Amino acid sequence: MLVNNINTLKSHIPTIVSGEFDKYSTYMADANNYIKRELLGSDLYEVIKDLTSTPPEAPEGGGETPADHSALVLRAEAVVSAKGYIACIPFLDLIQTESGFGVTRTDKIAPASPERVKALIAGTQQKLSDAIEELIDYLEETDTYHEDWKGSPAYTLLSDTYIETLREFRGYAAFTGNRLDFIKAKPRMLEAINFRICPVISQELNDEIIEQIRDEDLTDDNKSILPHLKFAFALFTIGEEKSATSYLMRVRKVITTTPDNYPTFKTSALYATIQAQTTTENSGSIFRTPL
């Protein structure tokens, strides 16, 4: 486990002042599974676990000491500690007896009121949210870990949209939620793409641009319309329909007036439909009987 002793746990949770790790171990194990499954992926989790169990040693004969990756380890430990502690708070002073549950009292410290316990849970939940945000931000900014991180849901979750990170998203729309809220917004993001953007620029052009974003090989023409697409995507996601539509119509104008610059759009079924409608409208105007 990434957090496997009381001293590490205490360093991240200030309300723990004493006690044996055994009473926390089950909850920390669950939190370890969470961070492995939802945030890090198996490969990066194993890297961090190895770092916590066998820190790198300085090479014999001198030379540069290997990176200890302490910044990554500390961020991962913070997530696990907060996640596990939230889960165990309701059970810390409860025991099960033959006649039911009881509350343990092994010292003279007065028990906390329910309100204080609720405040502790709320505060730890915020601590968890902040820790997740800090961990993923750090991973996004640190290329060293990208190869091992690519298999995680957190890395791939938004790679099929125009904007992959919360930090960038906030540059295009006012998103007041935290990292977890951003992840939960994925269905709205896909709805914005599938039901708002694709019917205007074509499924084919949409897929091409997202693929080029993922591969970091955007063409100059696609690059020129991408900022408007990002604004439209972000604003549709948060429900700002009017502003989002305005940005999207700017993109539509560019690709329909210069279709040769967007061959994927020009060969799409959507463009063929647009051309057919234009021909029909023009034909109608030619044969319309003047009043």
Image (tube, rainbow, N blue to C red):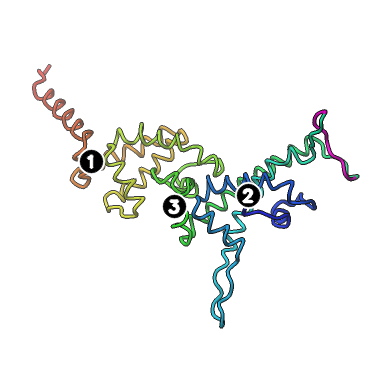
Q: Nearer the viewer, mark 2 or mark 1?
A: 2
Residue 150 — which label?
A: 3
Q: Quadrant of residue 192?
A: top left
Answer whether residue 100 is magenta in the image.
yes
Looking at the rendered structure, the secondary structure element under dot 2 is helix
Q: Which mark is residue 56?
A: none
In the image, residue 100 lies at what x, y percent?
A: 80, 29
Quadrant where the C terminus is found in the figure: top left
Report x, y in % for residue 284: 13, 23
**Element type where label 3 sits in the image:** loop
Classify 168 as above or below 278: below
What range is drawn magenta here? 99-107
Quadrant of residue 98 in the image?
Answer: top right
Say which label, 2 or 3, has the lower sequence index: 2
| Residue 157 coordinates in the image, percent (x, y) | 45, 44
Q: CA distance from mark 1 to mark 3?
A: 30 Å
> Up-down: is 251 above or below 49?
above
Q: Is residue 21 left or right of residue 157?
A: right
Q: Residue at x 47, y 54 (%)?
A: 149
Give the residue pinned by disc 1.
Answer: 265
Mark 2 neighbour density, 10 Å: few (under 14) some (14–19) many (20 or more) = many
